[in-house]
Image: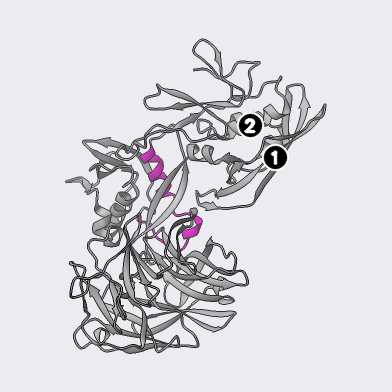
Amino acid sequence: MTRAEAGGRPGVVRAGAGRRVGAAMLVAALTCGGTACSVIPIGGGSIAVDNVRKGNPLGDPYARVIAVPPNPGWSAEEVVTGFRAAMASVDDPGRDIARRYLTDDFARKWDPHSGVTVYKQGEPLAVQAGLKESRVTLKGTVTAIIDQDGRYRPSGGLLNEPFSLVKGANGWRISAAPQGLLLSEADADRAYLKVDLYFLDPGWKGLVIDQVRVPIDPTANFAKTTVERLLNGPSSSLKGAVRSAFDGTELIDVTTQNNRVVVNLTRRVAADLVGPMSAQLAATLAELTKGGWGFEVRVGGEPYYTDNPLSIDAQEQSTFDPWTTPGEIYPYYMADGALWLLGKEKTGQPVPGKAGEKDGTRDHPAINSQAQVAALSGGDRRIAVAPLVTGGQWQEWVTGDSLVPPCWDRYQTMWTVNRRDDHTSKVMRFRDGQRYEVSAPDLETAYVTSLKVARDGVHVAAVVRDAQGEQVKIGTVIGQGNATRIANLQLVVPAEGKQTIKDIAWKDGKTLYVLTGKSELLEASVTAAPKSLASDSRIQTITALDGSLLAGAVDDDKKQQILYWTSAKWEPLVKDEKGSQDFAHNGPSAPAYPLG
């Protein structure tokens, strides 16, 4: 297969006996051994390619966009079309072919690595043609921004990007255009890998996900590209919030041998970081190695240890951090004024201690991983905590002007927000009898209605009310003790039409469920636009854990029940002593998974 010959059109290639493909087309070779190829339009729809990358750690077919240089006979519009095609070529990572579409002066100024704007084209290119100067405008809708470090941020707004062109001895060339790359959604999907990197929490005991986009490198296998990106550190959204066991070492190569992925490093890590390093590797490569692949780490091509290899189990991340793949964990819930624990047969029983005794003054329970419950007490001015053991007593931990329901993080720290007035909120955390005020500049001048820390202890979600309604933001927890702060807050559910938010619940470290005031359930994250799952007017509260999503529901007769989501509909969950799952007065409500 050859590049277009002189006199062709932008993106045109001659394949085989010189058959010409239309002017707005690109060649995309599906590199499964470099044999098959297909043709796709610039900015067109995705190619249907089975994702055999799962279970194949070294690579899978990718759409290979081959850039072609400009031709002196092309019009200004065709030059812009060819330039857009060249920007999408992963086989030209330095975008050297793309620079040939630019004037010498602009070629020196243009930086293709300053970021990526992802768009959906709305109409044909608008052309204002002249004899020596022309202007071509690309119009559409911006859908996302990919930062230099791979951070993918959904975006919005109109795309209206002009390209200025001048005509010289070699034809039309672009003299001014936007910095960075402009890629259609389909081009971005073809040029970038969606990768989940895993770093370590500040205590070096848990894993924290960092969702990034990594440019495809046709000279390297996918596993090597992924591990190289892991060793480069977290994206800007997690800077200062996480750690890495790989500091000080570099990657040589990633290969396979005897059903193992072999990661070859330049040097060893500290002895106490071998476990965390192994967990980072196993978690980051999990999607690439489904099918039982294990891992081995070598140094300079030699075994990691002098007397034996460093072998890593395929599920090492689960051993290191059980919250990455939680096992059978049963939810708690309120019933008849007391806290109950659901059992295997979908029946429950009161928890031990005072929390399991009838008391209508506690609300919005939150449970930590050490069998303690925190709850609003007598309204929203107090929070009390009780151990879930025989004889466990309620103890008042917090008083305030107006407190949001409490939540726990993985370090047995309880969080809440005190609203002093409609424009003043102060985030607080409590541990071992100590109170710590948390710096959160983006929240301190707003009215916060809810705050939930994810099970990784780093990601945090907040519901904020403004004049437009209630919106949801996701950020990160940075620092410890009195130096703790919340930063990098990103809007994931905008305020629209005076909407309210009933509840939020973390599914895992990357997905947040949001229940609106209209009982519409949304799935939100920092890397995708909100997705609507289901609406049910009965739902009042939610909790989630991995693949389980529960809701506290109230019917028209004010009877209560807990529902679970089957992925298609809501079904009643809790049985009473007679085996009935009907809604009941003072029935099951306010379900809560630990750290939920």
Reply above or below: 522 against 292.
Answer: below
Q: Does the magenta segment cover residue 244?
A: yes
Q: Amino acid at mark 1?
A: Ala
Q: What span is colored magenta in the figure?
A: 222-245
Q: Is residue 556 left or right of residue 163?
A: left
Q: Pick out the residue farthest to the right.
A: 131
Instruction: Choose between 398 and 422: the one closer to the eye.
Output: 422
Q: Quadrant of residue 389?
A: bottom left
Q: Residue at 56% of width from left, 62% of height from top?
A: 494
**Are the residues flagged by discs 2 and 1 in contact, CB closer than 8 Å?**
yes
Q: Secondary structure at mark 2?
A: helix
Is 153 rendered above or below residue 205? above
- Indicate left or right for 247 with 355 as reference: right
Name the quadrant containing residue 510: bottom left
First reached walking from the N terminus: tag 2 or tag 1: 2
Left or right side of 11 for 393: left
Indicate how the structure is coloured in the image: one colour
Which residue is denoted by mark 2 in the rendering? 83
- Residue farthest to the front, as pictured: 557
Disc 2 to disc 1, how far (Cα)? 11 Å
Q: Is residue 450 magenta?
A: no
Where residue 195 appears, as percent x and y from the top left, is 41, 47
Extreme residue toward the top, this view: 17
Per the rendering, the mark at residue 177 is 1
Q: Nearer the viewer, residue 567 or 59?
A: 567
Q: Tag 2: residue type?
A: Phe
